[in-house]
Amino acid sequence: MLLTVRAMSDIAKNDAEKPATPEAPRRRSWFAILPLVAFLALGALFYFRLGAGDPNQLPSALIGRPAPQTSLPPLEGLNAAGANVPGIQSSDFNGSVTLVNVFASWCIPCAEEAPLFVQLAKDKRVRVVGINYKDAPDNARRFLGRYGNPYQAVGVDASGRTAIEWGVYGVPETFIVGKDGKIAYKLVGPLTPDNIDSIMRVQIEKALKAGA
């Protein structure tokens, strides 16, 4: 009996001293790199999905849907042609093609695109309105006084809540709202000399024809 117990003890000791098989480390190494593989796959999918189309048009669930319910107060003290510039209401989006530009005085690209919006505002077939995003009223008025005010209405989004409802990624962004009150196009980033004709004017014409 003692011999049997001792023999079993020796077998257990020998098993404990045997080196681990290479399968366990290999299995652990595969588990370690799986998250990295998944991350790279998702990154590649995201890159190619965005790269397949217009780089200024990120996916938006609002395209083709009614513009979000919007009620923004006017920018206090902002006047044009001797009258106060009104704020923005959802009813303003019905019956005309409207460009909704999200801007701020502290936004450098907004200053660069401002003269281009002054050009677009000369087209009387469209309305140009601005959502002033998280800005100081004095700074916003100085900004429009310096670069020109292309907006028929300016709504103050002091909290940024409206921008969230519109799905804004960052300032500046511009939306085209059709005569039916639905969002027809979204430009992410600034209006530039390169895209004002090749993209923005093309999309405006599409919206005008759709309304007709």
Image (cartoon, rainbow, N blue to C red):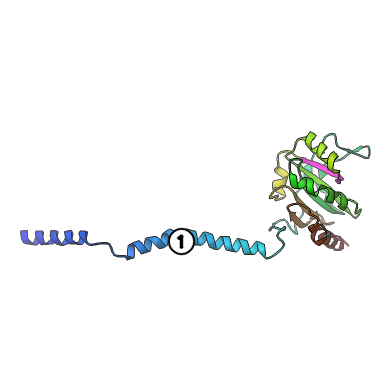
Task: Please count the marks in the image.
Answer: 1
Tell me the SS state at disc 1.
Answer: helix
Q: Is residue 176 visible?
A: yes
Q: Position of residue 78 (x, y in %)?
A: 86, 37
Residue topped by disc 1: 34
Local crowd at mark 1 within 10 Å, few (<14), some, or many (≥20)? Answer: few
Expressed as whole percent of the image width and height from the top left, the position of residue 27 reads 37, 63
The N terminus lies in quadrant: bottom left
Determine whether, in the image, residue 80 is placed left or right of residue 46. Answer: right
Q: Quadrant of residue 139?
A: top right
Q: Which residues are magenta?
A: 150-156
Q: Quadrant of residue 59?
A: bottom right
Res 67 visible: no
Could you tell me the amino acid type at mark 1? Leu
- Residue situated furthest right in the rendering: 82
Q: Quadrant of residue 43?
A: bottom right
Magenta stretch: residue 172 in it? no
Seen at 48% across and 58% down, the residue is: 35
Q: Is residue 83 above or below residue 64?
A: above
Q: Nearer the viewer, residue 16 or 94?
A: 16
User: Could you say where residue 125 lies in the image, as x and y percent from the top left?
Assistant: 90, 55
Identify whether 38 is placed above or below 121: below
In the shown orientation, is residue 26 left or right of residue 141?
left
Towards the viewer: 99 or 89: 99
Residue beneath the point at 73% across and 52% down: 189
